[in-house]
Amino acid sequence: MSTAGRSVRAEVWDRLAASDPGLLRLTAGLRTVCAIGLTLLLLGPPGVGVTHLVAGAMVAMAATFAIREKQPARQAVTLALGLPVALASVTLGALLNTRVVAGDLFFVALIFCAVYGRRFGERGTTLGLIAFQTYFISLFVRASAGALPGLYGAIAVGFACSATARFVLVRQTPAGTLDRLRRAFRARLAQLVHAQTELLDAGPEEVEKALDDVRTGTARLHEAALMIQSRLEDGASDEATARLVQRRIAEAEIAAERLGLLLLTARAERRADTLTLHLPGAPVPSAVREPVREEAIDALRRDLRALRVQVLRPAGADSGTGLSQVRNRLLGYREGENLPPASPAVQDVFRGLGEAARAVLGLRIALDGPQDDSDDSPATARSREELDAEDVAIAAGEDGRRGDEQPTGLRRPTTRAAVQVSVGSALAILGGELLSAHRWYWAVLACWIVFINTASTGEILVKGYRRVLGTVLGVVAGIGLAALVGHHTWTAFGLVLLLIFAMFYTAPLSYTLMSFFVTAMLGLLYTLLNTYSAAVLILRVEETALGAACGALAAAVVLPVRTDRRTDELLVTALDRLADVTRAAADQLSGGAPADLLDMARDLDQALADLRASAQPLTHPITPLRSRRDTARYLVALLETCAYHARSLAATAELLPSHPSIAADPRLRVVGRRIVHNIEALAARVADRRATAELETDPSIASLLEPGSYHTPRYGRVTDRVLRHLQRLDEAVAGLARPLDVPVRQPKG
């Protein structure tokens, strides 16, 4: 293949990897389609009836998507246990099909057990889901006792095909998934650098789009970093490797964020327009502008493109004097070598480029192994020595993560959810049978689904709304597809496979889209079962709306978890994690004992992700409480700003044991303690509105910075950077006081 052909293929692959990190959505869609397609191929030629074909295909789909474990051996055990569970469930469904009361009572009991089983981990969740889905399938195909032998065969074939698709046709190992996630991180990092380059040159008309691209790129890079962290434990060869990769990923993310902020400052100095970039820690540009040399901007543009090439360079492509010279030039900027004549703001961007180049080098060594160092400059050699010293320190570290106290009894989330879903399902059965004596189970399915991955009444309301909207749109599509397909059985099955792939590919992106594809697929299934009519699909909309309403009612009345209470709990958790990271980082930067800052930062990221998800009902466009929506968005944005600066402090503190140019500064301890006190005061106020804690203000941080200049370091570049992160963190924490109604104590005198 020609070089141009390989380049195009690599570009396409990078775009795909960036849009679907780890190819998780593509793999899920292909695996499910393969399992269903193989089931149809095995059951079709023997002349099995359409009912058994549909049952086998639905079982294959359920057995494929229900598996949650990441290790193949555990997946195999769970799949083997799922087969007898499925056979027992479909048997009871067929036997109780004609006994309405007994069948309804058993269905509610099964739902309770299936949801309660989530407390036993991924395997309990999977087996409960298989039990529910196969019972639902027995209702969908109207199974009877006489049809059980054929259904047993179809279910067994479905499970066998699911295993074949998972372990043979579309294999996915933890190490392979982690490797693809690494490639996705690189691709997203390169996209962010490209967006930053576009921001540098964007005119007044293009600037909003450029800013939006940088915001989106920053968020997508953080998403990829979190996905890698969640897979490290299973995918890395050992704990030391996992910690090293985690460290290098965090460094690259922070360096890219910092580069964006420095570019914003340089752009504000260069152009007359003032930009507001809602990135974490975006600085306020100075009103005093210095002349900017266009030669320096040209060099900056060139080096940003060179950095992107360094990020995307494939493993093993280290040879070549040109690439080495570019790498040496970028790394030299870290130490102020060959900085072009320019204003301090622009020179800071070049230094930021050097830091980003070092992060890319560290990431490449961690992911691809040792690199060719024959053409290293002294600056590059020093960067490698620093990275090697850090590797040794990381390998010697210990994992001291703490476990959180788990609630018991009805306060346990699985117990509460089981009771709520059971009550909601009982209401859905009663209401669904009033709408239709034959298809009431759609209401139960909708009630079941709105409780998946939700933890508050508001989340259930939003998910129910999306479910109904997707179902309405899917009904329109289903009517059109059913009319086009007619009685062409295999054409209908082909379209079903296509819709199933689309359903799994879009599920993590949009629940509305997933519901749309599910409903359109059901229109084709009803056609195959010769039970299709427009009235049937309209009835599905009614049953879905009823089920969602029953779920929301049960969540609001039975052991309710109000959205604001849930959000407050997660806000307290996020503030506690922020205080932990800030305290440990400030203490270590002040000369204290080293702490496990990487795990603390990861806990902070996860707490923020949980808070962001929980706050969705408050920030959703359809919420009628616009003031609360604006406040929630403001709080989340400020917390993300705090998290960025806390992560940056943690990353700098981690360098202390191995970085020769960074020394501890005892003055930082007092500043850190005051910031931690303020964070704890915020958490205390959120946890208890009667708390009397106050925020303390003090100009001590600002007084340590050089007056009148944003760029001139007073204590050295690293210490100056730490002070500025502390200053921004202090300002962001103080900004949280007003929306949280926390009083601020003014300094004396």
Image (cartoon, rainbow, N blue to C red):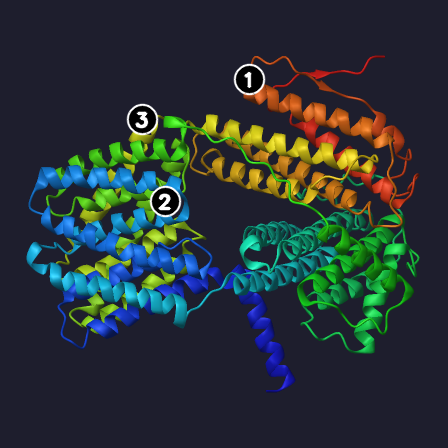
Task: List x then y, in percent, for residue 115.
Answer: 32, 40
Q: Secondary structure at mark 1?
A: loop
- The image quadrant that residue 101 belongs to is top left
Vertical relation: 163 (above or below) 387: below
In which image quadrant can residue 381 be found? bottom right
Q: Secondary structure at mark 3?
A: loop
Labels 3 & 2 near each other (Cβ < 8 A): no
User: In the image, residue 51 lies at what x, y percent?
Assistant: 15, 63
Say few, some or many: other residues with alpha carbon within 10 Å of mark 3 (under 14 / 14 to 19 / 20 or more).
Answer: some
Secondary structure beneath label 2: helix
Q: Position of residue 176 (x, y in %)?
A: 53, 65
- What residue would you read off at disc 1? 688
Q: Which residue is mark 2?
A: 466
- Distance from label 3 to label 2 (Cα)? 22 Å
One can see residue 738 in this view: no
What kind of residue is marked 1? Asp
Residue 668 shown left or right of residue 114 in the figure: right
Identify residue type, mark 3: Val
Chain-order first, disc 3 or disc 2: 2
The residue where tag 3 is placed is 558
- Residue 591 seen in render: yes
N-terminal of the pair, mark 3 or mark 1, is: 3
Q: Amino acid at mark 2?
A: Arg
Horizontal and vertical percent position of residue 340: 91, 59
Say which quadrant the N terminus sits in.
bottom right
| Alpha carbon distance from label 3 to label 1 | 24 Å
